[in-house]
Image (tube, rainbow, N blue to C red):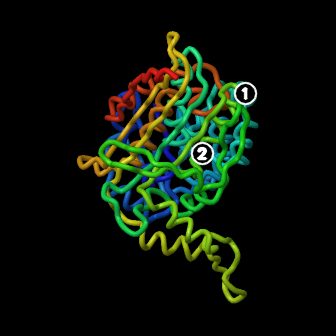
Amino acid sequence: MKIAVLGAGAIGSAVAYDLCRRDEVTRVQVCEARPGMLRAFRQTWTHPKLRTYLADARDAQTLTPILSGSTCIVSCVAPELNGSLARMAIEMGAHFVDLGSPDTIREEEESLAALAERRQRWVVTGSGLAPGLAGILVLRGIKTLDEAHAAHVRVGDVPTDSLEPFNYRLAHAAEKLIEDYTHPVPVLRNGAVEMRDPMTGIETVDVEGFGEMEAFYAGNGLGAIARALEGRLDRLDAKTLRYPGHASQMRFLLDLGLADTTSIDVRTHLTYRDILIRRMRKRLGGAYRDAVVVRVEVEGRKEGDEGRLVYELVDHFDEATGLSAMQRCTGFPAAAAAVLLGDRRVPGGGVGSAEEVLPFGPFFEMLDANGLTIQERWEVAEPA
């Protein structure tokens, strides 16, 4: 099968790397609009199956002949493009996989359901880490238990070494981090969706190998699963994991108004947010060794006992490949989704999130083969 990857940045690189190693895949085509980014990709990654193209994901005329014949298209570009790219993929007879989209774009993708079903092709949204792997673990836990009441997701990327003063480095775009830290976060309470202010609800989480970490509400792309489980699950919440102190320091910057989109003054088009993004790139960007921590707890009843099913994953920067933990934990799930779709291991067609569409068994087998092994345990609740 031929699979196309749009975007040669950090996550697109990881997706392409994984796809090239899979026997089912005969060709991997990577399209990138930025010459410098494409040049860096070509210098780092080579493989007989790999082809690269200087092409903008917004230029349908240029993309169409390149993508023609693709079994699946994986979007690792700006999520605002996913709606139009999904339509292009379905009309070309290809499946489509993305890493997550804003609500308005997701609605645009969902409007393609009838077309996708007729063409027997899938649009699978949110197939990275969160959304993606985290949501799949929630659904896996719910289906494993006889009865589920609540689910709690704690997921985050951190530098291997805590670095003052922010105890954080940029694993993805600064713009994405600010969006995560300024948008309300959906939760389930009493079976209904409620919204929580970002960077609130701070709690302490003990993680083996890291000690005490802090978790707080921040955008993590799990709004779709919250809506899907409304009325089916009593409680659901998802929080971002960071080193202690990070939330209060970032909250201080945001409370000063440095994430505002208003212009600094009439003589410039620059906004306060523009300046903050530039400084974050300067001070928090660059290469570093990282780790990703995922913990999903699903509470309920199993074989007559009340308790909680716990899934855990801790992944580290890979010295052998140079891939960061964030690249691996986001890119490898997306690559697995593309292969499962292209190999026709998901019958039919339509639009759905990764946790709704992908078969859990083969999906986790593919992750396990990449060293992303999920630890699972059942903890029986103490008698009241």
Q: Nearer the viewer, residue 367 or 41?
A: 367
Q: Residue at x 53, y 42 (%)?
A: 130
Q: Is residue 204 above or below residue 71?
A: below
Relative to 120, residue 227 above or below = below
Three-letter code, disc 1:
Gly
What is the residue that sits farthest to the top in this orientation?
Answer: 303
Q: Residue at x 43, y 59 (%)?
A: 38
In this image, 60 relative to 165: left or right?
right
Q: Position of residue 266 (x, y in %)?
A: 72, 87
Q: Nearer the viewer, residue 182 or 244?
A: 244
**Where does the image place residue 23, in percent across and percent down from the top left?**
35, 28
Residue nearer the viewer, 271 or 242:
242
Q: Which residue is mark 2?
A: 221
Instruction: Assess disc 2: are there few (<14), some (14-19) or many (≥20) residues with their C-alpha within 10 Å of its C-alpha.
Output: many
Real-space Cα separation, disc 1 to disc 2, in angstroms: 20 Å
Residue occupying the point 37% across, 61% down: 40
Which comes before the other along the chain, label 1 or label 2? 2
Q: Is residue 193 left or right of residue 177?
A: right
Q: Is residue 175 left or right of residue 352?
A: left
| Mark sitting on residue 141 | none
The residue where tag 1 is placed is 231
Q: Secondary structure at mark 2?
A: loop
Q: Which kind of residue does numbered mark 2 sit on?
A: Gly
Residue ranking furthest to the left? 320
Specify the quadrant of the image occupied by residue 207. Answer: top left
The answer to whether 107 appears left or right of 168 in the picture is right
